[in-house]
Image (cartoon, rainbow, N blue to C red):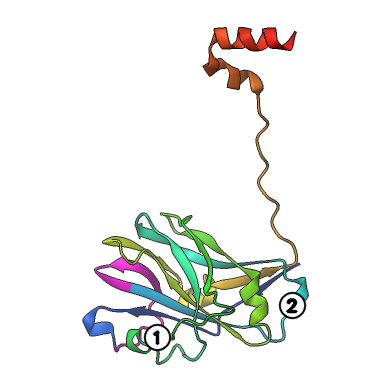
């Protein structure tokens, strides 16, 4: 079973001097560095869901967007939920919120360069610790890079069709299958002489 949770709040914040005190709600979600630092905030209500806390085996944050400058990384960091999308700015952004000393919820570098859906795996530890309350996330990228930037749709774009969403699943994805090893191909670089020695030792 899979449950999809849409954000109650989402907002882009930017540290360009003229934007530090400006609320940038309904302007999409920017993340990374492009002339200035860009971060985005998301808040999810984890109350009254059609899944039980102990059933959650996997979580991911799904976004629709693309990278403009690469390489990119998307980091999901837990922050205080004491903000709202109508008033938050760069200068009033929420502080990091630690659970047992932890705050990095997940990250990915798998960000498309053409518009598409992509996901950030989220550690279920954070979901379960905030169960029945609000889970607040700050998205940030490579902040030391000169240009490393991607953007994603917010919950208002196209009537919410491309809104960010927190996916909670009762099943963890299967690990990728390991390719079968062909021992003959491994022996080729060793050279004929080495193969002959190995053959003699087997007698």
The image position of residue 71, as x and y in percent, is 37, 54
Please tell me which residue lies in front, 166 or 104.
Answer: 104
Q: Which residues are magenta?
A: 21-37
Residue 201 sits in quarter: top right
Q: CA distance from mark 2 to mark 1?
A: 29 Å
Provide the secondary structure element on which disc 2 rests: helix
The answer, for residue 51, to whether it is visible in the render is no
Residue 106 sits in quarter: bottom right
Q: Which mark is residue 93?
A: 1
Q: Residue at x 36, y 80 (%)?
A: 13
Pick the quarter of the image with the C terminus.
top right
Query: Few, some or many C-alpha atoms within 10 Å of disc 1 (few <14, some 14-19, many ≥20)?
Result: many
Number of marks drawn: 2
Q: Quick check: is 30 in the magenta stretch?
A: yes
The image position of residue 149, as x and y in percent, is 35, 63
Relative to 53, is 156 on the left or the right? left
Provide the secondary structure element on which disc 1 rests: loop
């Amino acid at each position: 079973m899979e449950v999809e949770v849409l954000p109650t709040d989402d907002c882009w914040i930017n540290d360009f001097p003229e934007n530090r005190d400006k609320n940038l709600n309904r302007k999409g979600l920017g993340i990374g560095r492009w002339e200035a630092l860009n971060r985005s905030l998301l808040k999810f209500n984890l109350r009254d869901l059609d899944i039980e806390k102990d059933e959650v085996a996997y979580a991911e944050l799904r976004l629709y967007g693309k990278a403009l400058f690469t390489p990119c990384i998307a980091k999901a960091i837990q922050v205080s939920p004491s903000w709202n999308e109508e008033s938050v700015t760069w200068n009033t952004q929420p502080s990091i919120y630690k659970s047992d000393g932890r705050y990095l919820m997940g990250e990915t570098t798998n960000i498309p360069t053409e518009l598409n859906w992509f996901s950030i795996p989220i550690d279920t530890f954070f979901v379960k610790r905030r169960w029945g309350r609000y889970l607040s996330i700050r998205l940030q990228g490579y902040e030391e890079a000169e240009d490393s930037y991607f953007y994603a749709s917010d919950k208002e774009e196209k009537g919410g069709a491309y809104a960010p969403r927190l996916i909670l699943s009762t099943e963890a994805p299967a690990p990728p299958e390991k390719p079968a090893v062909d021992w003959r191909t491994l022996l080729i670089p060793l050279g004929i002489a080495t193969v002959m020695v190995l053959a003699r030792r087997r007698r």
